Amino acid sequence: GPESYSKLQVAEDFLSPPRHLFWRCESLQESEGRSGADNRMIGIDGALLEGGGQVVRISSSLSALTKAPVRIHSIRAGRPKPGLAAQHLAGIQLVAALCSGSLSGDGIGSVEVRLSPGDSLLQQKEYLSDAKTAGATSLLLQSSLPVCSFPSSMPAHSKTKLTLKGGTNVPFSPQFEYVQHVLLPNLRKLVGLEADVKLIRRGVFPKGGGVIEASVTAKESVEGFDVMERGKVTGLRGFSWACGGSAESEVEKMSLGVREELSKAGGDLRGAEVAFEKSVEGKGAGKCYGTVLWATTESGMIIGASSLAGKGTDPLSCGASAASELIREVAHGGCVDCYMQDQVIVFMSLSPSPSQISCGPITQHTRTAIHFAQLLTGATFTVTEGGGLCTLHCSGKPGSK
C-alpha cells in the first residue's frame, strides 16, 4: 500500500565559514498517514533507512504514547533472516502490555505486525519481558522507557518496575554499564527522566540468561532542552568485566589496553587517568569480556564508549578499542556520543518545547529515529552540519502546549 516517507531537503548557507548544510526533514504522508481518519492505521515501512529492529522499537513506543495505531510491515526485510526475532517480539509485546493495546501478527519471523493502543497506560506496577535468548535487555528497555516515563494519562510520580531478561552485554546493543552510567544520566539531565537500573545477573552471547531490573517514575511532560556547549572533560571512569576462562587476567589486560591507548591521546584526554571498576564473574555465563568507558564534562553531559569480545580475541585489544572509540567521540566536540545520538530523538519529539543539541556526524540510526518520530508525532527536525560538528533541532510536538 501507499507509504509515508521523509525527504531530506539540502540547502547551503554561505553566511559564515565553515559552510553548513541544513537538512529540513519533511514528513510526506499519504493515505496511511495522519491525513486520514483518526482510527486509521499509520503505515510503517520496516525496511526504510536502518531497516532493522530500531524501526519496530521506535514505532511501537511512539504509537503507545500518541495512541496512534500502526501497521509495521516489511520488518527487517533486508536482513539475512527477515521478520521479528525473539528480542523484537518481546519488545513489542511489552509495549502492547504497557499501553493495554491489541497486537496481531506477533510471532517469530513475522514480517508484519499491527498495534492498536488501548485507552490507558501502565495499568500494572510491574512488568516482565523475557527475550528467551541472548536478545538485548538494553533494547527491551529502549522500547519501554519512554512509555513508562511520560505517559500522558498517568499522574506524575507513578512508578513502574520492569524486569527484563536476555543478554545484558551482547553485540549490536548498548552494554548494561553504558545504560547505567551514560544513557540514563544524560536523559536525566536533558529531559528530567527518573529511572534507575540494577544488574541482577549478567547475560552474554550466546546463552543469554541475564536479568536487569528498571524502576521508572512517570512525569507529566517531557522537558525541552538547549545543550550546545559540552565544556572540558572533568573525569574519566571505566568498567571492565569478564566471564569464564582466566577472567581475572583478562580484566587486567583490558584495563592495561585502555591506559596504553589513552596515553596517545591529545586534547581533553591528554594525560587522563581512568578510575576503573572491575568485575570477575562465573563460568556459567560463557567466555566473554567487555569494557565500558565514560567521560564526564563541565556541562554535565557524559560521553561513552565500549568494546565487547569473546574467545579468540585479545583482551588488550578489547580495552584499546574502547579507548580509541572514546578518543574519537570526545574529539568531535559534541554533547553526546554516536550511541546516545538517536536516543534523544524520541524525547525531543515528545516535548511541547523546542530542543536542540550538538553532536558528531549523524548516524543512520539517528536519521531513522527522526523519520519515524516526525511521522508519529508531527514534530519537525532540522539537522545542521558543519566542520564535523552537527546540531539536532526539534520544533517540539505540535498542539501539546
Image (tube, rainbow, N blue to C red):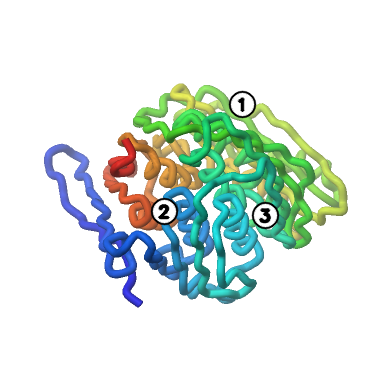
- Mark 1 and mark 3 lie on one chain; the one further toward the N terminus is 3
Label 2 and label 1: CA atoms lie apart by: 35 Å
173 and 291: which one is in front? 173
Residue type at tag 1: Glu
Q: Is residue 133 left or right of residue 322?
A: right
Q: Quadrant of the C terminus?
A: top left
Residue that appears at 73% across and 59% down:
205
Residue that appears at 46% across and 68% down:
72
| Residue 211 locus on image (x, y percent) | 75, 48
Residue to which mark 2 is pinned: 369
Residue type at tag 2: Ala
Say whether marks 1 and 3 touch (CB < 8 Å).
no
The residue carrying pointer 1 sits among few (fewer than 14), some (14 to 19) or many (20 or more) residues within 10 Å by Cα, namely: few
Q: Which mark is residue 333?
A: none
| Residue 350 locus on image (x, y percent) | 40, 42
Residue to which mark 3 is pinned: 170
Q: Nearer the viewer, mark 2 or mark 1?
A: 2
Residue type at tag 3: Val
| Residue 254 locus on image (x, y percent) | 71, 42
Judged from the image, the secondary structure of the residue bearing numbered disc 1 is loop
